[in-house]
Structure formats: structure tokens, C-alpha cells
Image (cartoon, rainbow, N blue to C red):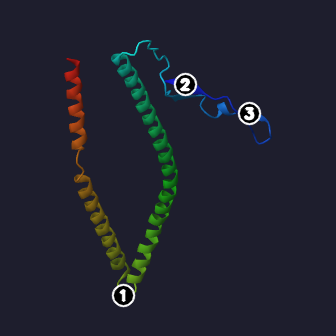
Amino acid sequence: MSPVSSAQTSPDINGQARDVASTAPARVPSIPLSAEHSPQFTEASVGGLVKEATIQLSTLIRSEVELAKAEVTSEVRKALKGSVFFVVALTVLLFSLFFLFIALGEVLDIWLPRSAAFSIVFVLMVLIAALFGLLGFRRVRSIRKPERTITSVRETAQLASRRKR
């Protein structure tokens, strides 16, 4: 891979020119679309043409993979930043549930002794936690290993070992 460098400046808050490279990486790895040292074929042999096509196809595939990784990384970062707000909302909701259960205990206190009312709320909370724990356990237990991927990797390894012989 050949590094791509960028020497850019942009004005800061005071209007002074500052080097952007100090805030961004100086070199970004990239894959060229053409071979850096592409051989010049003077004769148009089939072997030479196949070799050149293979080199160019390999470079193109590597470039596509790098592009896909860059795009996915960018989108994952956006998703992580957005998910922080969901985590904060769920945390606030979780703390709000305490007040709901206290209110439920107070309502039951109207008809029952206070200790019985809050004991009922406690048992209700334990049952809800057990139910969600059981559902989570069943979901985790149902996770299977990726059979198709494992089979595909084994087949590829067998083909590669056969070619080396």
C-alpha cells in the first residue's frame, strides 16, 4: 500500500492559518488502482496478459474491500454515537421504575398493611426479573455456531492445500 499524504491548512478561531495535519493523521493508507511497479509487456503472450489481468483484478478487489471497510467503519461510528442517547433514555426509564413500584406499594397500602403491600411489590419485581432472565437464557442457549461459514472455510483450506501440492 502506498500512503497518501495531505498538507492542508485551515483558519482557526482567530483567523490564523493552522496545519490540519496536526489534528488528522498525516498519512492515510490506500491501495492504488494500478500496480505501483506494473511490468511493461512488449510481447502480448497469453501468460503475460493473464498475469496482468490477475494483478489488476487483485488490486481492484483489495480496493473494494478497503472502501467497504471505510464505509462500514464510518456508519458504525455514527450508530455508536446515536446509541448513546438510547442508553441514556433507558437509564432514565430504569430509574423511573423505582418510583412506579413505590407508587404501587403505596396504592396497595390503602387496602393492606404496609409491610404486606411492599412485600407483594417485591415478589412481583422478583417474578418479572426471573421471567426476563429465563427469556434471555433461552435466547442465548439457542445461539448456534456458523456452520456454513465453518464449512466454507474448511473447503477453501482444502482447495488451497491441494493447489500447493
Residue at the spot of label 1: 111
Measure the alpha-carbon separation of dots 1 and 3.
Answer: 72 Å
Measure the alpha-carbon separation of dots 1 and 2.
Answer: 76 Å
Q: Secondary structure at mark 1?
A: loop
Residue 127 left/right relative to 57 = left
Residue depicted at x 50% and y 27%: 32
| Earlier sequence position, callout 2 versus callout 3 | 2
**Kind of residue at badge 3:** Arg
- Discs 1, 2 touching: Cβ within 8 Å: no
Task: Count numbered badges in the picture.
Answer: 3
- Discs 1, 3 touching: Cβ within 8 Å: no
Residue 19 figure quarter: top right
Q: Nearer the viewer, residue 111 or 72?
A: 72
- The answer to whether residue 28 is above or below residue 12 is above
Residue at the spot of label 3: 18
- How many C-alpha atoms fall within 10 Å of the one at disc 3: few (<14), some, or many (≥20)? some
Q: Secondary structure at mark 2?
A: strand
Residue depicted at x 23% and y 28%: 157
Q: Residue furthest top?
A: 42
- Discs 2, 3 touching: Cβ within 8 Å: no
- The answer to whether residue 28 is above or below residue 98 is above
Residue depicted at x 42% and y 80%: 106
Q: Residue furthest bottom?
A: 111
Residue at the spot of label 2: 3
